Image: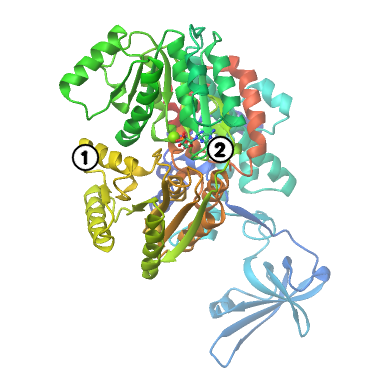
């Protein structure tokens, strides 16, 4: 036995990943193919294809059965009977003897069973206990014949996997049992010896075996915890590695003027305590020689823009250039307009670099950036282009970070390796997740809305009652307020989406001849978009029919109503972002969701929005409804690479794994790096080795 164990060559994750399941002698071609459909293509996939749930089917005493319980009983078959009901239902009953008396097992509509249920055979059955005429009966959910020592489907804690119609639960379970038992011992434990000892972690092979076929619940818990911890630990090490490749040495930025304070003092409102706190954190970062790498997170409408502007003015006052990058033209334009007003008053030179500016203007802008003639530049990802060169870029602010990948973040950084970085996001990621996702950033949270906000009241109307939404629209317009009407994408086609918006705008214009209906969609020329937004901002356009181009950042305080059509076609986070366009001033905001959600999931989304206003609550629901991989913007952070970790269930492990990753960064060797790369491909995307 020992010599056999010693002869096993241990394989790392990527080496296991190099063994395709169709090369395994225990598995036929057809089965391998079916596994492939489940996403199990190689040995690593297989070992980490974990059960979704378990059922405790350990054997109970026959004299302690309670009706209503689920129980598993083992005995020897004494008698088998078949009967039929008047409706033609076949019932097979097998009486079997146990050490604690007789029990009857019942199967419905499986007449063929009489062939295999033979007197004298031992049998284990599991199912619901019922009170029968002659003692306890069990309505059989699953059973196993014979005295097999390796009980798989009954007589133990039984795993349940995601199976398919072609590959039944029983078949899959049998495959897993055979293969996991065989190959789990091959898996090489990469956790540092000291860590394993310190945390008293069970060995990897045993944990894998136990997590599939647990010997008892306590052991299962420890095994799962070990695997989850390992996964989080490696993930955090990956984040640490990114962090280590980032230039940490920053520049002390000392303002030579009180530009940023002037800015705050001349605002028409007082900053919220949360905003003030965050400004303090940013100021501290900027004036230290450690490089700032900070995420500002706050729900839609909490006032992130002033925080960004403050930081930019602070950098300018210290003699550096600042860059503000937005994910869409429309938002970049809005930021520029806002900034320009301040810049003029404060004597700061601001410019915009978007796709819309004319060639000559662009060249002048690039030239001025290079020779220091511009203090603050606002733009889209056009800022990432090679020709964009700065004189002395000191601060990069990235708005609505979820729209950019880790990689884009890195490119902008490489233009000024010592520039401070401030990232803003409204993506309402649950607090328990932020650490995992943004482990490489320091975090500031604006957890407060400006005073006087009355929130956004959200309603749902079935498509047939659309007219009621228009009545409400008429009322808001009569009160001098403005509204958005959002048409969803009919299909994944910008063209069709644009067409839908055009039609809706025409229809609304006819319905409301006394008002001005504007139109905004992705296929309009940039200048046209700017013109429409200007009209809406200025109030000459009262109703703005738009596609989701308005989703992020747009800020028009007088807009009080947003009508979203085809609600079933949007994701939850997206809907929350959209409704965040209203209720941004002191007047209450209204959001009317229109559609005909057919699936339970779509209905859940609508319910969640009607019920919750807080973006964090919405995001938590979003995760619960859809699962982590799909939460907006998360894919690129490697979250969806998790095979073991369940971010809610394992939230308690995150802090610990992060702490240990810090402690053990020094022990990263090539093999562990390789493991991280293999296990978190999306994380590694942003890694520079
Ligand atoms: P977001 O965090 O969604 O980017 P914005 O920065 O666009 O939000 O701010 C939303 C609106 O709230 C803007 O019109 C802004 O001027 C206003 N605002 C920001 N901070 C405050 C405050 N402390 N008091 C009142 N209004 C504020
Ligand atoms: Mg914003």
User: Residue 528, labelled with which disc?
Assistant: 1
User: Residue 658, labelled with which disc?
Assistant: none
Point out residue 571 in the picture as x, y percentages from the top left corner. Answer: 43, 50
Q: Residue at x 68, y 26 (%)?
A: 196
Dot 2 falls on a residue whose secondary structure is: loop
Point out residue 208 in the picture as x, y percentages from the top left corner. Answer: 61, 40
Say which of 277 and 496 sits in front. Answer: 277
Dot 1 falls on a residue whose secondary structure is: helix
The residues bearing labels 2 and 1 have C-alpha atoms spaced at a distance of: 33 Å
Say which of 329 and 515 sits in front. Answer: 515
Q: Is residue 670 visible?
A: no
- Report if the CB atoms under discs 2 and 1 are less than 8 Å apart: no
Q: Residue at x 43, y 47 (%)?
A: 574
Q: Quadrant of the C terminus?
A: top left
Q: Which residue is mark 2?
A: 450
* Quarter residue 180 falls in: top right
User: Mark 2 or mark 1: which is in front?
Assistant: 2
Give the crowd class for mark 2: few <14, some 14-19, many >=20 residues within 10 Å: some
Left or right of 147? Residue 619 is left
Left or right of 120? Residue 597 is left
* Quarter residue 557 falls in: top left
Quarter of the displayed picture in which ligand 2 can be seen: top left
The answer as to whether callout 2 falls within 8 Å of ligand 1 is yes
Say which of 251 and 638 sits in front. Answer: 251
Q: Residue at x 65, y 57 (%)?
A: 151
């Amino acid at each position: 036995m020992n010599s056999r164990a010693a002869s096993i060559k241990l394989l790392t994750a990527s080496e296991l990943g190099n063994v395709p399941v169709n090369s395994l002698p225990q598995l036929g071609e057809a089965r391998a193919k079916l596994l492939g459909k489940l996403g199990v293509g190689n040995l690593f996939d297989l070992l980490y294809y974990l059960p979704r749930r378990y059922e405790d089917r350990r054997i109970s005493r026959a004299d302690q059965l309670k009706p209503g319980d689920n129980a598993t009983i083992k005995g020897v078959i004494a008698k088998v009977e078949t009967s039929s009901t008047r409706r033609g239902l076949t019932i097979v009953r097998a009486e079997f003897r146990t050490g604690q008396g007789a029990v009857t097992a019942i199967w419905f509509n499986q007449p063929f069973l009489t062939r295999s249920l033979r007197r004298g055979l031992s049998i284990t059955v599991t199912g619901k206990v019922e009170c029968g005429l002659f003692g306890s009966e069990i309505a059989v959910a699953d059973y196993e014949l014979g005295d097999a020592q390796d009980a798989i489907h009954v007589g133990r804690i039984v795993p349940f996997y995601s199976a398919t119609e072609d590959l039944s639960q029983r078949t899959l379970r049998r495959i897993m049992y055979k293969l996991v038992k065989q190959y789990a011992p091959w898996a090489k434990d990469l956790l540092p010896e000291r860590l394993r000892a310190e945390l008293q972690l069970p060995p990897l092979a045993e944990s894998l075996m136990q997590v599939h076929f647990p010997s008892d619940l306590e052991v299962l818990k420890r095994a799962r915890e070990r695997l989850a911890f390992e996964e989080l630990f490696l993930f955090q090490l990956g984040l640490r590695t990114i962090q280590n490749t980032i230039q940490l040495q920053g520049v002390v930025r000392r303002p030579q003027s009180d530009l940023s304070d002037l800015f705050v003092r001349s605002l028409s409102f007082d900053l919220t305590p949360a905003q003030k706190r965050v400004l303090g954190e940013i100021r501290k970062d900027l004036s230290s020689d450690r490089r700032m790498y900070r995420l500002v997170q706050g729900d839609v409408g909490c006032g992130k823009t002033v925080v960004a502007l403050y930081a930019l003015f602070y950098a300018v006052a210290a003699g550096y250039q600042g860059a503000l990058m937005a994910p869409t033209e429309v938002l970049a334009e809005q930021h520029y307009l806002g900034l320009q007003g301040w810049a003029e008053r404060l004597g700061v030179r601001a410019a915009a670099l978007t796709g819309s500016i004319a060639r000559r203007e662009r060249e002048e802008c690039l030239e001025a950036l290079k020779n220091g003639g511009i203090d603050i530049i606002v733009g889209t990802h056009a800022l990432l282009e090679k020709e964009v060169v700065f004189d002395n870029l000191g601060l990069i602010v990235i708005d609505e970070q979820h729209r950019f990948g880790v990689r884009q973040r890195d490119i902008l950084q490489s233009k000024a390796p010592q520039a401070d970085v401030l990232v803003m996001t409204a993506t309402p990621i649950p607090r328990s997740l932020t650490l995992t996702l943004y482990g490489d950033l320091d975090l500031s949270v604006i957890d407060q809305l400006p005073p006087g906000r009355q929130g956004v009241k959200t309603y749902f109307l079935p498509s047939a009652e659309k007219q009621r939404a228009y009545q409400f629209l008429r009322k808001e317009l009569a009160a001098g307020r403005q509204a958005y009407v959002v048409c969803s994408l009919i299909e994944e086609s910008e063209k069709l989406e644009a067409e839908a918006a055009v039609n809706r705008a025409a229809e609304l214009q006819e319905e409301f001849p006394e008002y001005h209906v504007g139109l905004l969609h992705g296929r309009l020329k940039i200048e046209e978009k700017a013109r429409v937004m200007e009209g809406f901002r200025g109030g000459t356009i009262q109703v703005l029919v738009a596609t989701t181009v308005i989703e992020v950042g747009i800020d028009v305080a007088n807009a009080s109503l947003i009508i979203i059509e085809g609600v079933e076609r949007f994701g939850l986070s997206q809907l929350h972002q959209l409704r965040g366009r209203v209720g941004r001033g002191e007047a209450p905001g209204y959001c009317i969701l229109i559609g005909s959600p057919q699936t339970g999931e779509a209905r859940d989304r609508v319910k969640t929005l009607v019920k919750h206003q807080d973006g964090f609550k919405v995001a938590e629901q979003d995760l619960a409804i859809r699962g982590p991989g799909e939460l907006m913007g998360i894919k690129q952070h490697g979250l969806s690479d998790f095979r073991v970790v369940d971010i809610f269930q394992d939230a308690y492990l995150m802090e610990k794994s992060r702490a240990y990753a810090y402690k053990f960064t020094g022990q990263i060797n090539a093999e562990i790096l390789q493991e991280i790369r293999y296990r978190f491909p999306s994380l590694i995307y942003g890694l520079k080795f």
